[in-house]
Image: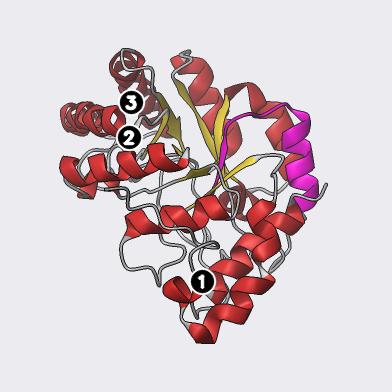
């Protein structure tokens, strides 16, 4: 039985309740919007819809062509199959999920002692990528090791990625490595800057290992966003975004997302930009609708 439910055509109240109906109608213009770039809501948006699989209907009805879900490997393969079925019904593509979710302390790349477990987790991720048809997966480098020369740690990351490339290449999947900011969110994390990420990519030298350039993290860590995106673009495979401060939707902070999106579009980027953020408005669906509308506005370049 086709469980496809139309967010706009079969009753907004069924999704939101009467109290949120006016907010949904105000956002209705976004449903027909044709975006210049492929933005991907994270699966936590529209959280008032109990089943995450059903949230895909709302994303598609707003005009989004993709979504992302970091926690896919916490699901059973059977549930992942249901997600794929809905994706196919809606014509949606899935962005990243985290391929080594234990990478913070058990399956990272910095410590060579964790390398066998890292490669085992990447191999397991290929099963999920095969179900959902993912073309990009995020990998976590892990925490820096106090007292070990940084060059040694970087060499360990390079070697781990070279071995991972042998795995993902067979499946046509690109592993994207994300520098994370240290001042606000990830003190002690190994990879923070985009220039060092670029250096790692050149050392690995694989078309299946690329940078995940998270605009939020890089604004905090180094700024100079547009210049850095242009400088490192040949090794960037994926983008994520949120505004600074707060990690909320564009327009709530200091980043001029209209200009950033214009620059990315000018580079002929055809991949995905994941909305790895939380709404500034905590009530749902109003918060998610504000996120969706912020993308509509930022896309007007």
Please name the residue shown 72% across and 65% down the image.
251
The image quadrant of residue 39 is top right
Magenta range: 257-274
Can residue 221 be seen from the camera position used here? yes
Q: Earlier in the sequence, mark 2 or mark 3?
A: 2
Q: Which residue is mark 2?
A: 132
Label 2's element?
helix
Label 3, secondary structure: give it.
Answer: helix
Tell me the CA gap for discs 3 and 1. Answer: 52 Å
On screen, residue 249 above or below 181:
below
Most distant residue in the bottom direction: 19
Q: Nearer the viewer, mark 3 or mark 1?
A: 1
Mark 1, residue position = 12
Residue 224 within the magenta-colored segment of the rendering: no
| Of callouts 2 and 1, the N-terminal one | 1
Pointer 2 and pointer 3: residues touching (CB < 8 Å)?
no
Callout 2: few (<14), some (14-19), or many (20+) C-alpha neighbours within 10 Å?
A: many
- Within-10-Å neighbours for mark 3: few <14, some 14–19, many 20+: some
Q: Quadrant of residue 265?
A: top right
The residue beneath circle 3 is 156
> What residue do we see at 70% from left, 67% from top?
253
Residue 250 visible in the current orientation: no
């Amino acid at each position: 039985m086709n469980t496809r439910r139309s967010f706009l055509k079969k009753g907004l109240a069924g999704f939101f309740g009467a109290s949120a109906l006016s907010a949904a109608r105000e956002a209705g213009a976004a449903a027909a919007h044709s975006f210049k770039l492929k933005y991907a809501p994270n699966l936590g948006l529209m959280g008032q819809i109990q089943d995450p699989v059903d949230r895909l209907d709302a994303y598609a009805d707003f005009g989004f062509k993709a979504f992302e879900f970091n926690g896919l490997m916490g699901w059973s393969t059977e549930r992942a199959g249901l997600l794929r079925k809905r994706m196919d019904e809606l014509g949606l593509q899935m962005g990243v999920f985290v391929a080594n979710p234990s990478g913070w302390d058990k399956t990272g790349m910095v410590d060579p002692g964790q390398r066998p477990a890292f490669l085992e987790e990447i191999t397991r991720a290929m099963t999920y990528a095969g179900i959902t048809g993912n073309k990009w997966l995020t990998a976590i480098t892990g925490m820096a090791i106090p007292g070990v020369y940084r060059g040694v740690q970087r060499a360990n990351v390079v070697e781990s990625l070279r071995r991972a490339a042998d795995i993902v290449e067979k499946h046509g999947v690109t592993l994207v490595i994300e520098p994370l900011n240290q001042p606000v969110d990830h003190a002690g994390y190994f990879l923070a800057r985009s220039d060092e990420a670029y250096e790692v990519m050149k050392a690995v030298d694989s078309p299946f290992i690329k940078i995940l350039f998270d605009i939020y993290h890089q604004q905090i860590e180094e700024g100079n966003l547009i210049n850095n995106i242009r400088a490192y673009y040949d090794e960037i495979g994926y983008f994520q975004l949120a505004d600074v401060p707060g990690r909320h939707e564009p327009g709530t902070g200091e980043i001029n997302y209209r200009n950033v999106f214009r620059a990315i579009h000018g580079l002929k980027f055809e991949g995905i930009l994941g909305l790895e953020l939380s709404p500034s408005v905590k009530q749902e669906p109003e918060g998610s609708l504000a996120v969706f509308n912020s993308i509509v506005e930022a896309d007007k370049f």
